[in-house]
Amino acid sequence: MISLVIPCYNEEESIPYFIKEINKVMDKMKKEKFELIFVNDGSKDKTLEMLKKLSKEDKRVKYISFSRNFGKEAAMLAGLEHTCGDYVAIMDADLQDPPELIIEMYNGIKEEGYDCVGLRRMTRRGEPKVRSFFAKCYYKIINKISNTEIVDGARDFRLMTRQMVNSILELQENNRYSKGIFSWVGYNTKWLEYKNVERVAGVTKWSFFKLFAYSIESIIAFSTFPLILSILVGLFLLFISFIMIIMLFYFKTEFLQVCTLMVFLGGIQITFLGVIGLYLSKIHIELQNRPKYIIKETNIKKAS
């Protein structure tokens, strides 16, 4: 069986197009069984109503509906935890993840022996130039400061073996960054390159600021470099201040210059205390151990 996990947030316009395309794929792969697990991440439109209707028309369609919006990471985790397929794929409902590539992904695992076949976009057509620029900078930075490789252009869309999915589910941290987790667990991965596809309907839920915050989360989750940087900068400033103290014995300075220096050093200290505070906040969240999502309703029956 192939399980498809589809996170949804206000996707009532996209779902009909998605169902039409995914049915074409399932018709071509008649020998394989499918289950479609839609995760309604607190949508405010008619997404849930559509999913309920689809589940009545097609037994392969299952849905999970959260009590509120918990974010895509939580939606992907919930979907993975409720799959029962031998192979599991994660994909978006907006058709930016071409469903027909599932066939090639499946062949990559079954015939070529890979544990995972993922999608990597080579162009960012349709994206604002500013977002594309910062995205490229982000991948360069995180791959230099982290021991876990984050593939530039990698999508969440990928097909994985059950063994790999089980390994992913063993990682239960609250601050999740799935692209990093997928890479961290290892396994042989094949990348399919494709040109970026624009949404078939609706608008993106990822604003520039949401993506920026998400990138900060990923850096904190997979790198301790900011902490090391703060120590190095602190030592460097101590060295500079020591030189300036020596210079004070030979050169007279005005009071304002001293105050300016103090303010500058204070600003640096506050900045890096903020970095440390970010890490402490993550520790605080982990210690709280709150559920990563709350299911309000679902048509998936619990195993007895």
Image: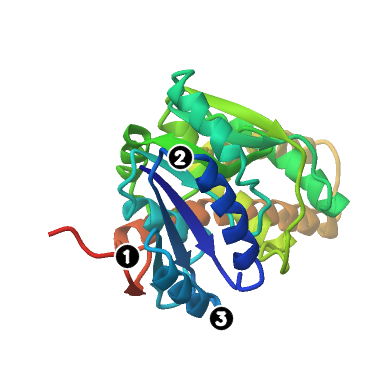
Please say if 190 is above or below 285. Answer: above
Horizontal and vertical percent position of residue 74: 44, 60
Crowdedness near tag 2: few (<14), some (14–19) or many (≥20) residues, C-alpha within 10 Å: some
Mark 1: amino acid = Pro
Q: Nearer the viewer, residue 272 or 38?
A: 38
Instruction: Judge left or right: residue 262 versus residue 180.
Output: right
Q: Nearer the viewer, residue 210 or 280?
A: 210
* Residue at 49% in and 69% down: 41
Horizontal and vertical percent position of residue 215: 62, 50
Mark toward the viewer: 3 or 2: 3
Q: How many marks?
A: 3
* Residue at 32% in and 53% down: 81
Where is mark 3, residue-wise? Answer: 46
In the picture, the disc for residue 291 is 1
**First in residue order: circle 3 vs circle 1:** 3
**First in residue order: circle 2 vs circle 1:** 2
User: Do we see residue 232 in this rendering?
Assistant: no
Query: How far separated are the C-alphas under marks 3 and 2?
Result: 32 Å
What element does badge 2 sit on?
Answer: helix
Where is mark 2, residue-wise? Answer: 181
Please say if 225 is above or below 197. Answer: above
Please say if 10 is above or below 186. Answer: below
In the picture, the disc for residue 262 is none
The C terminus - image quarter: bottom left
Query: How far separated are the C-alphas under marks 3 and 1?
Result: 26 Å
Mark 2: amino acid = Ile
The N terminus - image quarter: top left
